Image (cartoon, rainbow, N blue to C red):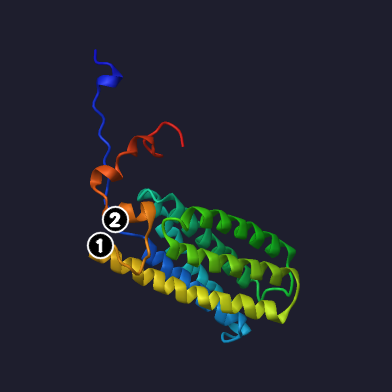
Amino acid sequence: MARMADVPVQIVLRPYGSSIPLASFAFATGNALYGAYLLHWIPVTESRLLAYMLLAFAAPLELGPSAMAFLARDTGGATAFAIFGASWIVEGLSLLQGPPPATSPATAVFLICLAICLLMLLVVTFKGKPLLGVVLIVALVRTCSAAAMAMTERAWLTASTAWCGLMLAVLAFYCGIAFLKEDVSQQISPLTFRTGEAKAAMEGKLEDQISAIGTEAGVRKQL
């Protein structure tokens, strides 16, 4: 009887398209919509309609790419997409109740926790994908501003949060275009500013990509 060690094991890798462009475009649209709402470009009377837009467009188009990023072995990107997607669900459900209150301790605590998550992701992401790192920096600033806005009613905090959101939308649209161009051409685009392992992932050979596959989640016995 053959021992288990003598039984050949096959690990099948499936090629996936990059989920970054779709998640970036959804993230950009959500921030543009909410920034416009805070600046009253979208009237308060349309808060429920805005909630439906965030719940039906921004949230699922980030949660879907999150699942695909996990399958593509990009844990950092998958985690970021999932956090942003879930945050749009929270925002959408809040808006369904009507215009947000002037202050909300629960919202403030939630946003502080979200800011901590973004800070941790920034530490991991910036080294290889500085473009995504810049997006996370602006997202961190916007989240901190929104947390302060939820703790104290100040007009300048509302304006700061709104304009940070619009800046974030511009950066996310650029990020989506840059990574879409790169994935279509299958060559490193200077627009993405890849460095380190992120650059090697595009330039390296297949053997380099799968050298540590035996210790990755889904292959090893425990996560």
Which sits in the foreground, 203 or 111?
203
Q: Are marks 1 and 2 in contact (CB under 8 Å)?
A: yes
**Residue 173, position in %: x, y?**
42, 74
Hey, what amino acid is under mark 1? Gln
Identify the image quadrant of residue 178: bottom left
Q: Amino acid at mark 2?
A: Met
Question: Who's the residue at 56% across and 82% down the image?
Answer: 36
Residue 213 visible, this orientation: yes
Q: Is residue 214 above or below residue 18?
A: above
Image quadrant where residue 7 sits: top left
Residue occupying image coordinates x 38% and y 66%? 22
Q: Secondary structure at mark 1?
A: loop
Residue denoted by label 1: 187
- Tell me the crowding category of disc 2: few under 14, some 14 to 19, or many 20 or more residues within 10 angstroms, Cα based: some
User: Seen in the image, is 91 located left or right of residue 17?
Assistant: right
Q: Earlier in the sequence, mark 1 or mark 2?
A: 1
Q: Position of residue 8 (x, y in %)?
A: 23, 27
**Residue 212 x %, y %:** 34, 38
Instruction: Label 2, secondary structure: give it.
Output: helix
Between the residue at mark 1 and the residue at mark 2, the CA separation in whole angstroms equals 7 Å
Q: Residue furthest top?
A: 1
> Within 10 angstroms of label 1, few (less than 14), some, or many (20 or more) residues?
few
Image quadrant holding the N terminus, namely: top left
177 shown above or below 218: below
Provide residue 75's location: percent of width, then percent of height: 44, 50
User: At 56% from the left edge and 73% from the top edge, which residue is drawn?
Assistant: 51
Q: Is residue 107 above or below residue 155?
A: above
Report how many numbered discs are placed on residues in the image.
2
- The residue to which callout 2 is attached is 202
- Quarter assignment of residue 23: bottom left
Q: Which mark is residue 79?
A: none
